Amino acid sequence: MDLSIIIVNYNVRHFLEQCIISVQNAIQHLNVEILVVDNNSVDDSVAYLKSCKAPVSCIFNSENVGFSKANNQAIKIAQGKYILLLNPDTIVAEDTLVKTLAYMNQHPEAGALGIRMLDSNGRYLPESKRGLPTPAVAFYKLFGLSACFPKSKRFGQYHLSYLSAHQNHPVDVLSGAFMLIQKAVLNKIGGLDERFFMYGEDVDLSYRITQAGYQNHYFAESSIIHHKGESTKKGNLNYVRLFYGAMARFAEKHLPENKSWLFIRLIHFAIWCRAGASLLYTVFKKILIPILDFFILLTGLYFCKEVYEMGFKLYPNFYSAAMLRLFFPLYALLWMGSMYLSGAYDKPFRAQPALRGLLQGSIFILLIYSLLPEYFRFSRALILLGSGFAFLYLVVSRLIFRLLFHKSERVGAVLILAQPAEGRRIELLLNSSTRPPEGIFYNVPESDAEFKNTMPRLEEYIRIHHITELIFSVPEYSTRDILACMAHFTNYGLKYRIVTAQSDTIIGGQNPNVKNDLFAFSLNDSGQPVNRRKKRLLELVLVFLLFLLSPFLIGLMSSPVNFFKNIFAVALKRRQLIGLASDHVPTPVIDLRQIGLASNDVLSDYMHHYRWEKDLVYCFKYLNKLGNKC
């Protein structure tokens, strides 16, 4: 067998699907096996792999054993002369496997080979080739000298940025996203070091290959697309800990003790600095808008009080200062609490949930106000005036926030490269997105031989219609065509996406600073944060009412003991009151699948068009089920 391709998957089902499709298109005449190891994914990766029509051999782990151990599991059963370690969030070109294997056969001194990688927007990824992370190289990287002097042989060692990305080179370190290795070399050096759970294993493996007398070669004559960092997002604290921790393990293992001591101290210092900065940034980002809202709403209430006193010629300080100090902050907090439950602080910031929360909060305040003793009811007019001020503030502020913080997320005009029927299907997906594009245009694909001749026509389309994104339908457009487009339109600032025939997911890098690269469809999913909050609040209210009414309800229950166990479990968040049983959420007391709602349409409607009123109806309709043993 020529080649064994090993893919370790963890919660990237949609990327995995396109990766496997691209591999199948690249196999051509080669004798290849595809081995996929799933590290206990909690998305629908396992279901996809079990129903996958491609000839894929799978290993399903019951826990996340890490990247190195998962690869070693597949290496043990691999039959190929060469082993390709391939990330699931990659797309290989049709000529990639043929060209790289031919190169390896012509260069027996090459123990391993890496490739030129592009991100989702067609930009070259510098980690395609790297130098060994010695203390000096790490210092230059951590303190930004490598970025300031990329062409310097001294400072540019980390990414070997002084070497051309368009020429083949022997290098120190290859990327684990695409690593083609001789099976004999892997057997000789003993596979991947399983102490590297994630990150650093490619550095360690590359180093051990050179120590065994072989070379690592960077191959620039073909390219792959790497949707960088999908399995583990790179902006969070966990990434910092894993990445720099892996560098420390490498230093402990391979560097002399006097050098490794300094290197490890430097790495620990970097971890603490990055962790502190990340924590401060995260906290600041989460509380900045709520704090701003609170102080402006509070200021607005005092402003309304002054206007009201002057307008109705009331004497100064007509209202008790002590009462205002108590109630004005309380009003602002109640408005903000209601806005939070309505999703006003979920990104992207929008006026609609904020105004909905304001309305609900104002109604709640007026209801509470009407129940207060006469002494505390000092003015309904101030509540109404304050609500009016809050309305104007929220409309203006959310518009400003959207312009400031989410300008890069707006979708301009889109050009779909697909056959008409598939293009219309993709258009429906786009229009059901939470951020539908400003315009949608089609272009029917030409044959492979004529594709390059269509570039001028595409340029005209892009210029006339102000296109900002290209969406390619696979397999109507090959990976070679997509890479050709990326290369041709490098200076156009376009974004690129890919959709597989009949798939309901459009993937691609929208923005390096935007974490979610999947189009978000505008289904009112029960898993959305705003719906989870509403569901939880409803559960707490219902549990409280059920407990109060328990003397009258226990006669309806099959087991009063189970009834109390269930409602207390819901209160402690160990169970959910109503829902669908799943491995990834608390078990529901009332499982909709077990109470006669077997229709897929009904269950799908509940999951994807959720409203809290449905839970209320189901709770009273199936009240007697609350005493069941689960």
Image: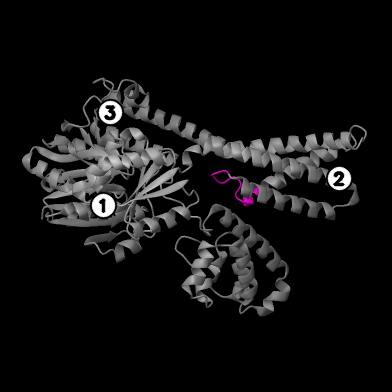
Which of 160/544 is in front? Answer: 160
Residue 281 in the image: x percent, y percent?
Answer: 52, 34
Cα separation, mark 2 vs mark 3, equals 67 Å
Residue under label 2: 379
Q: How is the protein colored in the picture?
A: one colour
Q: Is residue 467 above or below residue 543?
A: above
Amino acid at circle 3 = Tyr
* Residue drawn at x 32%, y 38% as measured from the top left: 246
Q: Secondary structure at mark 2?
A: loop
Q: Does the magenta stretch mainly form a helix, a strand or a loop?
A: loop
342 within the magenta span: yes
| Residue numbers of the magenta segment | 339-349
Left or right? Give the position of 365 relative to 193.
right
Residue 237 in the image: x percent, y percent?
Answer: 44, 39
Which of 519/159 is in front? Answer: 519
User: Mark 2 vs mark 3: which is more N-terminal?
Assistant: 3
User: Mark 1 vs mark 3: which is more N-terminal?
Assistant: 1
Which of 146/521 is in front? Answer: 521
Amino acid at circle 2 = Ser
Q: Secondary structure at mark 3?
A: loop
Residue 7 circle label: 1
Where residue 347 sits, quadrant-wise, is top right
Label 2 CA crowd tier, 10 Å (few <14, some 14–19, many 20+): few
Q: Secondary structure at mark 1?
A: strand
Residue 140 in the image: x percent, y percent?
Answer: 32, 23
Q: Nearer the viewer, mark 2 or mark 1?
A: 2
Residue under label 3: 158
Amino acid at circle 1 = Ile
Whether residue 61 is visible here, answered yes or no, is yes
Whether residue 338 is visible here, answered yes or no, is no
2 within the magenta span: no
